[in-house]
Image (cartoon, grey):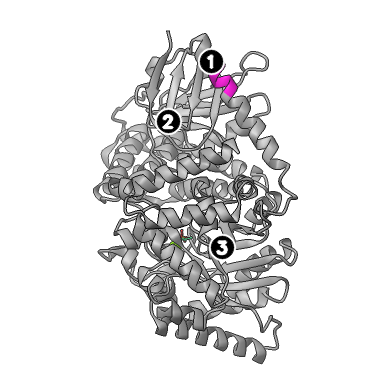
Amino acid sequence: MSREINGIGVSRGIAIGRAHRLSPSELDFRQYQIDRKDVLHEVARLNNAFSLVRAELDALRADVAPAAPQEVRAFLDLHRLILDDALLSDAPRDLVRTRLINAEWALSIQIEEVCKEFEAIDDEYFASRTQDVRQVADRVLKALAGGRAATASVTKPADGEKLILVAHDLAPADMLMLRDRSDVSLAGFVTELGGPTSHTAILARSLGLPAVLGAGGARDQVQEHELVIVDADAGKLIINPDASELAEYRRRAKSEVDARIELRKLKGKIARTKDGIAVELLANIEAPEDAREALDAGADGIGLYRTEFLFMNRDELPDEDEQFEAYARVARSMKGKPVVIRTLDIGADKVLNDAARESLGLAKGAPTAESNPALGLRAIRYCLAYPELFLTQLRAILRASSVGTVRILVPMLAHVHEIEQALAFVARAKEQLKERKQKFDGRALVGGMIEVPGAALNLPAFVQRLKFLSLGTNDLIQYTLAIDRADSSVAHLYDHLHPAVLQLVSRTIKTGEKARAPVSVCGEMAGELELTELLLGMGLRQFSMHPSQILAVKERVLDTSRRSAMQLAARVLKQSDPIESRKMLERAAARGRLA
Ligand code: PEP
Ligand code: MG
């Protein structure tokens, strides 16, 4: 009989395969007192185990394919940082010496200490990092036991069959090791731990693997090699499906693959509505490497390059040359297509390392000590507070404008004086480059993000001063509805169909149109298929989204006519209840499918 376990679907798609249960991450190890004469031996065991894991992570890092998503490298770097942190590597040695206990015991005491400190911080981000600490420590414990990586036990299933991992927890490094093994075809995975913001979840999305996390009790309920289905769309694991379920899921999995193949055919097509309105489909990227994925999806350019990722997870800030190299790499690879580079949006949930903050003269932990970091020193506010940081970045972006079509985008503007100060900094950066006789495109356009309701309600000031606008709907929703984007307890209230949000989006598009200032949407709304027709109807002509969404949005554009989209937008904008708006969108989509 088939059984089901519910969890959280953290990526999309369906995977059908044979289960492989990974051994639990908690190792059964002995705890015992040691003689003083054995201290050196225990410390040496710890040192060896750390060296082994270090070598393992370094080897994985060196093998990451150049085309792999940026997160892959970031996770391995984070695990390497945790491994080298004195709290994890030095403290257990001291415990061995002072308490005369064996290496495993000392390490496990220290893991609990570190995790307790993280858990005391009431913050989802830190709670997720506890999982990273345990994953790293788990590798060291395994090395101490002379064990192999958990995934080494995975054996090739019968010919042609795919493998679904069922684990208590799965470290990103293990996921990579498995993916790289040519003898194992990993189709998806299920873990008992983990939530939507854990690194395991983010990596699953980047690698395009169907995954269900937080499926409590999964390992106990699944037999080794049992047939299972991971339905990441619905967030469930189906164990031992009956014949009709299996047939239905096979049909769905096949139609997903067919749909992806069909979509690839649209790559070279211009995104035009049925009545001939051309639309630009642009990509959001976080690192220069991502430009390849954007080109591969046929993007018309980069609509948002989030540069802050170049500044995060490191102790020294990137200097002007390093920044120039990164920005110029994107500009060159896009071969003349527009590249919108956003100035540093640090603050809120995106923070610099302590050492990097100290180099700016900031006390350790200062920004996170703010009671409301999302409303605090963030984005343009941060840049205006640290003029050298801002000027250095502006010079680097301007220099990159000499090798491609580069535009500058300033985030989180709310006040006219912030726009004016930002423009004055751009002018100053140009002067400095002229003095240095360095090349840049003097006509590089400067635009602003509309992501604060105060900006969306004062648009004339923006269109008079800026050459283009980009709607950051992720933040616009957060600030309009007073919902912290990072707080899962209020996530159910975050609704892009809230009438206030739709009014602000529509007004911005209309005002930009009248003033001939191009407007794009670069928040998640741009890649939501349920919204394509509505946004087209509001007059949007530039959509910027994760590259993986581009072809699906293109398909929607090709299937829509301007007339019907405008009618739909007019009806939805009259609604005061998002439930009604959603029904209207569903009916319109169904009509489109029948047409
Ligand atoms: C937004 O706020 O919609 C946006 C695109 O910026 P970010 O998600 O980086 O804040
Ligand atoms: Mg934003």
Asked if residue 513 lies left or right of residue 384, the reply is: right
- Residue type, label 2: Gly
- Residue type, label 3: Leu
- Residue type, label 1: Leu
Asked if residue 553 lies left or right of residue 388, the reply is: right
Q: CA distance from mark 2 to mark 1?
A: 17 Å
Residue corresponding to mark 2: 235
Residue corresponding to mark 1: 246
Is residue 87 visible in this depiction of the protein?
A: yes
Q: Position of residue 251 (x, y in %)?
A: 59, 21
Q: Position of residue 114 (x, y in %)?
A: 31, 46
Q: Position of residue 475 (x, y in %)?
A: 40, 61
Number of disc labels: 3
Classify residue 584 by image quadrant: top left
Image quadrant, ligand 2: bottom left
Q: Is residue 248 magenta?
A: yes
Label located before the other in sequence (2 or 3): 2
Identify which residue is drawn at 64% across, 66% down: 339
Identify which residue is drawn at 67% across, 63% down: 330
Identify which residue is drawn at 61% across, 16% down: 157
Residue 475: mark: none
Magenta residues (range): 247-251
In front: label 1 or label 3: 1
Is label 3's Cβ within 8 Å of ligand 1? Answer: yes
Q: CA distance from mark 2 to mark 3?
A: 30 Å
Relative height, residue 47 to residue 179 (above, below): below
Asked if residue 362 lies left or right of residue 427, the reply is: left
Residue corresponding to mark 3: 304
